[in-house]
Amino acid sequence: MQLTIRDLSKTYPNGVQALDGVSLDVPSGMFGLLGPNGAGKSTLMRTIATLQDADSGGIDFDGIDVLRQKTEVRQLLGYLPQEFGLDPKAVCGDLLSHFAALKGIPSGAARKEAVEALLHQTNLWQHRAKRLGGFSGGMKQRFGIAQALLGDPRLLIVDEPTAGLDPEERQRFHNLLAEIGQNVVVILSTHIVDDVSDLCDRMAIIHKGRVLCSGKPQDQVAALAGKVWTKSVEKPALPGLRERLTVISTRLFGGRTIARVYSPSDPGDGFAPAAPDLEDVYFTTIRLADATFTNGNQK
């Protein structure tokens, strides 16, 4: 199974170009789509999920034209949007059974078996008789993934699934996604680098509607070897540093600012080489793209 996206573009009526010639190959397993807020991730997810149309381009999933055969796609699709409304008065097990009916799972033993299996899989069995209004954020997310898994989807889309979760709930959600991702195509759209680093075999970075890079996370990290440098700097020196070098990130440690910069060669001035990680890949890619975009506009 593979999802193939080619030259997908979308411009909203207000003139915002959310997607600009997006092309991606998404194989079976966990695929991470990284990008800042407003990068076009949610637009891409909604388009794949047949909830909105593209202006141009195409999407193929295992021989199905996603943009034209929407009914066929929906029969194979599970979708957990970034925000989804749930009736706080609804009972967990009853609402999941209702969603199962909407997915076309026949009534009786088959539906009961499917609902009970998902309640166990998402660790909600003991909460099946509770109203959703009393659920924590993590429990609501687990309910969201339970409804997305109804009907054994072959394509699963989860949009910002761990935003706002505490560390324990986030780890539970990671374990659940890792288990699911062994057998289907799972697209994890997020701005949280650790989610992709922990879960995904392949990834892409999208920014301002464009795919900036794609491939295996470890390959992207390896490509930065010898190009990341670090140094403790005084805060007043940061503006000058940003004028001279591509600053990837800064953080406070022991009252001082630790700066990480991108440079193909030794930047000197006391910088020491640092082992790159996926966060460095993410920020470097975004920073260099922004610099190119700014310089292009200035010409």
Image (tube, helix red, strand yellow):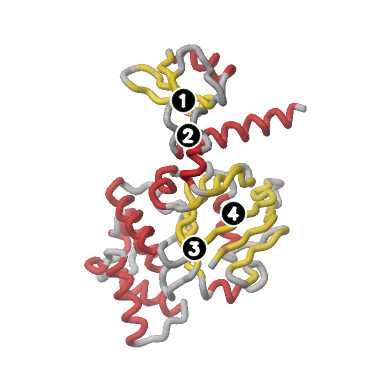
Q: Residue at the location (29% across, 75% down)?
A: 116
Q: Which residue is mark 3?
A: 28
- On residue 280, which mark appears? 2
Q: Residue at x 64, y 73 (%)?
A: 69
Q: Nearer the viewer, residue 69 or 166?
A: 69
Mark 1, residue position: 260
In this view, the residue in front, 85 or 256, is 256
Front: mark 1 or 4: 1
Gap between marks 1 and 4, in whole Å?
A: 32 Å
| Mark 1 surroundings: few (<14), some (14-19) or many (≥20) residues within 10 A | many
Q: CA distance from mark 1 to mark 2?
A: 8 Å
Which badge, 1 or 3, comes first in the chain's sequence? 3
Of the 4 image quadrants, the one containing the C terminus is top right
Q: Do the residues bearing badges 1 and 2 touch, measured as CB atoms within 8 Å?
A: yes
Labels 4 and 2: the sequence-earlier one: 4
First reached walking from the N terminus: tag 1 or tag 4: 4
From what the image shows, is residue 143 above or below residue 208?
below
Q: Nearer the viewer, mark 4 or mark 3?
A: 3
Expressed as whole percent of the image width and height from the top left, the position of residue 264 reads: 56, 26
Secondary structure of the residue carrying numbered label 1: strand
